[in-house]
Amino acid sequence: MTQVVLEPGNPHDFTQNELDELSKLLQEQHGVDVRTAFRPQRGYGITFPEVINVFVDVSEAASSIAGGIAVLKTVVTWAQNRWRKDRDKDTRSKPRPRVVVLYDGGGKLLKRVTVDSPSGEPTEEEPLNESGRMPPDA
C-alpha cells in the first residue's frame, strides 16, 4: 500500500480536524495509508504562505508515480477549498497563499504548487534544485 505523510510547514496553520479530514479524503479517494507528522518548530515559525509538505512513497513504476500525482491533485484541491473559504469569509483582504510541496518517499522534491490567484487557481512550479528533505519520523 502506498504510504503518504502529511507534514505542515507550521503546525499552527492547520487544525488536527483539518488534517484528519484531508487524511480521510486521501484514504477514500486513493486507498493510501496516511499519517500526519510534525517537526519541532524552529525560530518563530513566521512564513507568509501556509505550507503542507506531502511525502508519497513512489517507486519508478509509472503507476506509482501517477498515484503520487493524483494524491498531489487531491491535496491541491483541498488547499484551494481552504483558500476560497477564507476569501469568502473576509472579502476585504486576500487570504494567505497555500503551498503544497510534493516529495517522494526518499525526500526528493518533485513538485511545488501555489494557490494564490484571484480565482484561487493553482500555479505549478518546477523544482529549482535537487535538494531534498527527509520525511519526518512519526
Image (spheres, rainbow, N blue to C red):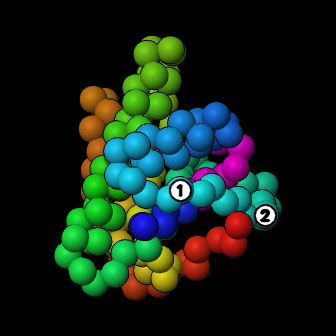
Residue 136's disc number: none
Magenta segment includes 26: no
In the picture, which quadrant includes the C terminus? bottom right
Task: Give x and y (percent) for residue 1.
Answer: 43, 67
| Mark sitting earlier along the chain (2/1) | 1
Please give the range of residues in magenta. 6-13
Do callouts 2 and 1 mark residues in contact (Cβ within 8 Å)? no
58 vs 80, nearest the viewer: 58
Label 1 Cα crowd, 10 Å radius (few <14 / some 14-19 / many 20+): many
Task: Give x and y (percent) for residue 29.
Answer: 34, 45
> In which image quadrant can residue 19 be found?
top right
Q: Which residue is mark 2?
A: 40
Q: Which residue is mark 1?
A: 34
Label 2 Cα crowd, 10 Å radius (few <14 / some 14-19 / many 20+): few
Q: Secondary structure at mark 2?
A: loop
Q: Residue at x 37, y 75 (%)?
A: 58
Task: Give x and y (percent) for residue 117.
Answer: 32, 37
Query: Image check: 16 left or right of 79?
Result: right
Q: Secondary structure at mark 1?
A: strand
Residue 51 in the image: above or below residue 20 = below
Q: Residue at x 35, y 52 (%)?
A: 30
Q: Give, as a three-letter code, the residue at label 2.
A: Pro
Residue 56 in view in this figure? no
Looking at this rendering, what residue extends furthest in the left direction?
62
Q: Give, as a three-letter code, the residue at label 1.
A: Val
